[in-house]
Amino acid sequence: MTDTATPKTTAAKGRREGRIAQFLHATEIDTRLLGMIGALLLIWVGFHFFGLYKNGFGAFLTPRNLWNLSVQTSSIGIMATGMVLVIVTRNIDLSVGSILGFCAILMGVLQVKILPQYLGIGHPAIWMLAVLAGIIVGSLVGGFQGVLIAYGKIPAFIVTLGGLLVWRGAAFLVARGETISPVDSTFALLGGGPYGAVGSTGSWIVGLIACAAIIYFVISGRARRQRFGFHVRPIWAEYVMGALACGIVIGAVLLVNAYPWPIGIVRQYAEANNIVLPESGLFISHGFAIPILILVGVGLAMTVLMTRTRFGRYVFAIGGNPEAAKLAGINTQWMTVKIFALMGGLAGLSAVVASARLGSATNALGTLDELYVIAAAVIGGTSLAGGVGTIYGAILGAFVMQSLQTGMVLVGFDAAMQQIIVGSVLVLAVYLDNQYRARAK
Amino acid sequence: MTDKSKQTPLVDLRNISISFGGIKAVDGVSLDLYPGEVVGLLGHNGAGKSTLSKILSGAYEADSGEIWINGKRADIRSPRDARDHNIETIYQTLALADNLDAASNLFLGRELVNRWGMVDDSRMESETRKIMARLNPNFKKLKEPVSALSGGQRQSVAIARAVYFNARILIMDEPTAALGVHETAMVADLIKELKSQGLGIFLISHDTREMMELCDRVSVMKNGQLIGTENVADVTEDDILSMIIMGKNPRAEVA
């Protein structure tokens, strides 16, 4: 009996798996990406119901928490996109947290102590000059480290380990350890908060532009492949993919618009604008926070850089075979300098987001960030052996790291437990990724 | 072959030397190569064949000596310079980035870009398809990283890279070392075809018999020095073997 039954069930199972495999094959969805999104959703749902069970209230899957999560992820996520390039080329950057701190304190001093003397407090150019200075200083610091690595032939691990200490120390010296606050009011918007978000209408505009772009790329991509006579996805798969992507965008818009301003902020806003508050209160949506829009912008720009430009192609080539890259006429040393300069510049941009969010600049800002950034890139599938990595993976990795952190705070784990879990997850994620890759081969 | 003296050599290496840590890897070697000619470089491991070829391909810079291309002094300091002189190299190690697909490897350092300056993957894939159809009709794995390819397939990617860009001078370092019988024959046919198109080819190999078949002249090196260059038609396989092993040119002694 059992003998006859077994083949039947496995056959049925095989057919069902076959259909899923067919779907994945037709839509050309990256199964690794699917796995990561699945893991992320599992963490979200897990913490939500764990909170429901333990505290009687599931706080995770609420617009408020997810909105905050997006803001908290931005700083790490921005740096993780740069860390992908560094790790893909078989290097490492341990100094990003310290560069962040150094840039933050410089920008703080610049906008609080120096620029107001010449321009007056609240001058609209202050925030722009501060942001520009932060990104430039970050790039210079990163580029300098890149020169030591590429031309001084000092291992990246050592140079950036030195940088970890040097730039943290330098951050202290800039203001003798003082906390610089408050930052310029326009600058502060870059860190999020009720005013640092684009609102309901703004979010719909962003969302619709994104949907239009998705549809354009689906159509133009198909047309291009057809022109060269390459294999194209079946038309239904194109519809499914387009609808899925647009659905996610619209879902995100609905989510951020479902998170209203707190009553205090609404009252303040109403007073400032001479609006009479109705009895039931006003529902003013946050909309997308500016930091998450910065992260999305950085992610798109870095994806284009990595997949559509010669620079990105050379990054992968150097990671795959540095000798071959050199023989193909690629200036690998200068590439290394540029990659580290880019990483430093992104750390400068993260410093903008982090210090704006805090509303002040301290020399301790970004402490231990290097570990979260590296973890995000690695969880996102960047191989430490070099040659493999994606920008979207690193951003998803940053979301995974931040979701774990946030979730554990929400359900009330203490700090020691948080560290143990984050560390274990990192090791487990890399183990699972290795298993996946071994099987995919 | 007899009118060679009237032609301008495609490549004229004059008195090339290079040393690594006090050891002369190439010691005062002069060689020339004419259009439509295959010159074989023979010698033991470490004789300096690959080092000499890497000087011509721009991977190393000679300590002394001159490189003349088409009767003009050439200054080759990087692989890019060599490519600018239409010198293409198939390295013994193949020099492929394992994580990239065939098209990305073929165009590495010379990517086709669209009017926005973005790499045009579709056009590169289409061009790769065309050249591969000519070189290795069985080649189908265009989208996979070259690490997933067999030795012969990887070799054909490396060869395609050298042939695609209209090389005038080709350096082939052990092009058949990793290949089966059938694929070796394909490479031999390709060499003959390229030769008939007027390319000059430096061929490096250990297989003396293969060299006798494919080359017009062979040069033998030992310990960085050139032992001699002979027309293949004038010597026997034994003569060449004794040059490789003894480091002496028997015919030079007779003459």
Image (cartoon, coloured by chain):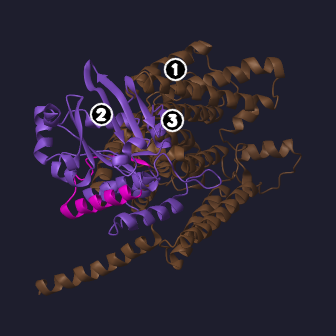
- Determine which residue is flagged by label 2: B51
Q: Which chain is purple?
A: B
Q: Assess whether mark 2 and mark 1 are in contact (beta carbons under 8 angstroms).
A: no
CA gap, disc 1 to disc 3? 19 Å
Is residue B192 shown in magenta?
A: yes
Neighbor class of circle 1 (other Cα within 10 Å; few <14, some 14-19, many 20+) is many
Q: Is residue B231 left or right of residue A110?
A: left
Q: Amino acid at mark 3?
A: Ile
- Determine which residue is flagged by label 3: A339
- Per the image, label 1 sits on a secondary structure element best described as helix
Q: Is residue B103 left or right of residue A300?
A: left
Q: Is residue A168 visible?
A: yes
- Per the image, label 2 sits on a secondary structure element best described as helix
**Chain A representation colour:** brown
Between B168 and B215, the residue placed more toward the observer is B215
Q: Amino acid at mark 2?
A: Thr
Q: Position of residue A192 (x, y in %)?
A: 66, 42
Name the residue rendered at 50%, 59% in the picture.
Answer: B124
Q: Assess whether mark 3 and mark 1 are in contact (beta carbons under 8 angstroms).
A: no
Q: Is residue A294 left or right of residue A151?
A: right
Between A391 and B218, the residue placed more toward the observer is B218
